[in-house]
Image: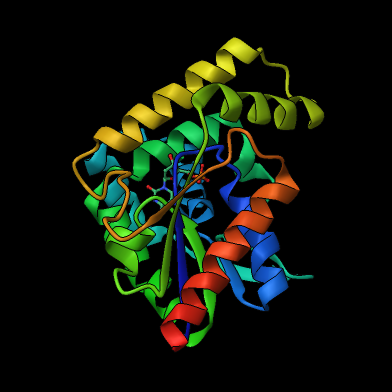
Amino acid sequence: MISIAIDGPSGAGKSTISRTVAEKLGYLYVDTGALYRTIGLFVLRNGGDPKNETQVAALLPQLKVDMGYENGIQQMFLQGENVTDQIRTPEVSMAASGVSAHGCVRAYLLDLQRRLARENNVIMDGRDIGTVVLPDADVKIFLTASSEVRAKRRFKELTAKGEKTTFETVLEDVEKRDYADIHRALSPLTQAEDAVVADTSQLDFAESVTLIQKIITDHLSKKMV
Ligand code: DC
C-alpha cells in the first residue's frame, strides 16, 4: 500500500488540496483533523472542558466515533449521528485543539489511523502524520502558507457559510491554534526531516493541486526506479 502524509498548520488548504489530489490518484483521503474535531464536539456536548485531560479521559470510554464515505466525501459519526457539518464551527475548532493535546486522545486515534493506511492507498492529512502516525510514509509533504493568507481563506469560508465573524477574530484564532499546535508537548506540529515543504501563499487552488500532485508523482517514480 502507498501512503502519502500531508502535514501543516490549520487553514493551509490541506483538506481541499489533499482530497482533490487523492481523487485524481484514486487514493483514499483521510482527514485526521475531523477525528479530533469529533472528539472535541463530544467533550463539549458532555459539558467537559476540552483542555482538562482528566475530564476528557473520563469521558472517552463512552465515546463512539466512526468514519465513512458518501460520494467520496468523508463523513464523521458521533454516537451514530452524522456530525460532519457540526464539527466545522470555530467553537469546535478550539475544542479540537484542546483535546488533541492529550495523550489519551492521541493514543485512542493512533490505531484507527494506522489501520486505514495499512488497508488502503491513502493521502492522510494532519499535524503528525509524517512524524508519528506514518513515519514510513512513501511521500511526506509539509503544506503551509502565511497566517494572513490562511486567515483570509478561513474568513471567506466562514462568511460564505453565514457565520458572523471578523477577519481580525479569524486571524487571532488561526494564530492561537498555531501556537497551541506547535507548542504542545505531545506530537507537536513539526516538519518531518524528510518532508518536502510546499508553501501555497502565492498559489491559487489549482496551482496548489498541481504542485502537490507533482511532488507526489515525482517522489513515487523516483522510488520505483
Ligand atoms: O486540521 P483541523 O483544523 O481540522 O484540525 C483540528 C485540530 O486537531 C487542530 O487544532 C490540531 C488537531 N490535529 C492534531 O493534533 N493532529 C492531527 N493529525 C490532526 C489534527
Residue depicted at x 79% and y 70%? 71
Report the number of discs.
0
Looking at the picture, does residue 50 appear above or below residue 58?
above
Relative image position of residue 174 (x, y in whole percent): 49, 26
113 vs 45, left or right, is left
Residue depicted at x 26% and y 56%? 193
**Residue 81 appears anywhere in the view:** no
Looking at the picture, does residue 136 appear above or below residue 9?
below
Furthest-left residue in this view: 185
Relative image position of residue 12 (x, y in whole percent): 55, 40
Looking at the picture, does residue 163 appear above or below residue 225?
above
Query: Looking at the rendering, in which quadrant would you find the C terminus?
Result: bottom left
**Residue 135 appears anywhere in the view:** yes
Residue depicted at x 73% and y 32%? 157
**Image quarter of residue 97:** top left
40 vs 207, left or right, is left
